[in-house]
Amino acid sequence: MTALHRSVFLVSLPFVILSFLLPGYGRATGADVLRIGLFFSAFFLMTVLLRPVIGWGIERYGRRPCHLAGPGVYAATWAAFAFIDTPAGVMGARAGQGVASSLLWLAAYTITAGVAGQSAGASSAAFR
């Protein structure tokens, strides 16, 4: 479980900083107040819309590939922020972070549920 805790912590830490910096970053790209609000909404909208699809993917391909894809997509979106200079680019990156969030958190929830349902000695089977 420590690998699960570590990955969730490392992915969640930058969001504290992003919550404070995103409005200023949006202004620097020329976004108005409405678009800055949409930056926050795009993340949550993608998270909600993709949960059924990601759930199907977890059932079909397993928890581990989806859990590993989450931080990979997060890394790509964080790297994209270094090159984005338009509000549409920020919107796309935030939507990508919503995809990554769905991948990471749904897989983490199912891994945790699998471990909780097993004895302590068989917890490694939860990664399938």
Image: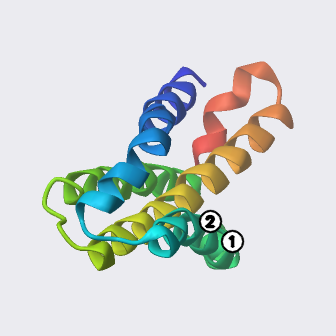
The quadrant in which residue 118 appears is: top right
SS type, badge 2: helix
Q: Front-most of 22 and 116?
A: 22
Question: Circle 2 sits on which residue?
Answer: 44
From this viewpoint, is residue 46 visible? yes
Q: Give how far across and how far down residue 89 sits, in percent.
A: 27, 73
Residue in the foreground of this view, choosing between 124 and 104: 104
Residue 29 image offset from top left, x and y in percent? 24, 65
> Pointer 2: residues within 10 angstroms few (<14), some, or many (20+)?
some
Query: CB atoms at circles 1 and 2 under 8 Å apart?
Result: yes
- Kindly identify the residue that appears in the image at 35 percent across and 66 percent down: 93
Q: Name which residue type carries label 2.
A: Phe
Q: In the image, is residue 28 above or below residue 37?
A: above
In x, y percent, where is residue 127?
58, 43
The alpha-carbon separation of the residues under discs 1 and 2 comes to 6 Å
Q: Residue at x 72, y 50 (%)?
A: 110
Percent position of residue 77, x then y:
30, 58
Q: What residue is drawn where x is 65% and y is 79%?
A: 49
Three-letter code for the amino acid on which mark 1 is drawn:
Val
Q: In the rendered view, would you say 74 is above or below 15?
A: below
Residue 62 visible somewhere in the drawing: no
Outermost residue to the right = 117
Q: Label 1 neighbourhood size at 10 Å, few (<14), some (14-19), many (20+)?
A: few
> 34 or 22: nearer the eye?
34
Provide the residue designation for mark 1.
48
Dot 1 lies on which element? helix
